[in-house]
Amino acid sequence: MEEQLSLLGMKTRRQQPITDELIRKQRSKLAAFRLAVQVSGLDEKEIYLPLGVDKATWSKILSGLFNFPTNKEGQFYDLVGNEIPLTWAAYDRGYALVPLQDEKDRRIADLEQANAELKREIQTLVKYGVIQAAKGVR
């Protein structure tokens, strides 16, 4: 996802640390969104422009007049470098979030996929005689 956002010219930020206690103290999901923006250290323009939201709409979202577009939440989390509203919503419903994979596991999976793709490409090149297979290599 981060690479896709970068290709679109969108900045992405690494996860920003924040205590669960501070997240739980937020009175609403709107307050959690505001906290997420504040913690990011980004100017609001650096958030609403990449999301494709105009300034007036963004202002109405943060004032509570409009709802945040749910199909853009993942993009928002990547931009601000935290998932405070998602975490708040889980706590509000009596749940806690646990990542299915940590960053290391995701990186390993990405590298394994890239390795498999390279192996397929090499096998294709060997098959059509573009290159020769090294001895002892499958």
Image (cartoon, rainbow, N blue to C red):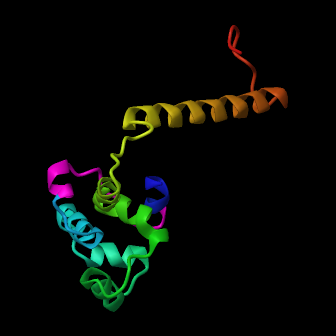
- Residue 54, percent across and down? 37, 87
**Lateral position of residue 59 relative to residue 120, left or right:** left
**Looking at the image, how many numbered discs can be counted on the residues?**
0
Residue 23 visible from this viewpoint: yes
133 versus 21 height, above or below: above
Q: What x and y, as percent, mark residue 126?
A: 78, 26
Magenta region includes residue 9: yes
Residue at the bottom extreme, as displayed: 56
Range drawn in magenta: 7-24
Q: Residue at x 31, y 54 (%)?
A: 87
Which residue is painted at 43% across and 36% down in the image?
A: 101
Where on the picture, by quarter, is residue 27?
A: bottom left
Q: Is residue 11 visible?
A: no
The answer to whether residue 38 is left or right of residue 12 is left
Q: Which of 118 and 35 lies nearest the eye of the viewer?
A: 35
Rendering quarter of residue 23: bottom left
| 20 drawn magenta | yes
The picture places residue 6, in percent across and down from the top left corner, at 43, 60
Residue appearing at x 68%, y 13% in the figure = 137
In the image as oriented, which residue stretches furthest toward the top?
136
50 and 69: which is toward the camera: 69
Magenta stretch, main secondary structure, is loop
In the image, residue 48 above or below residue 25: below
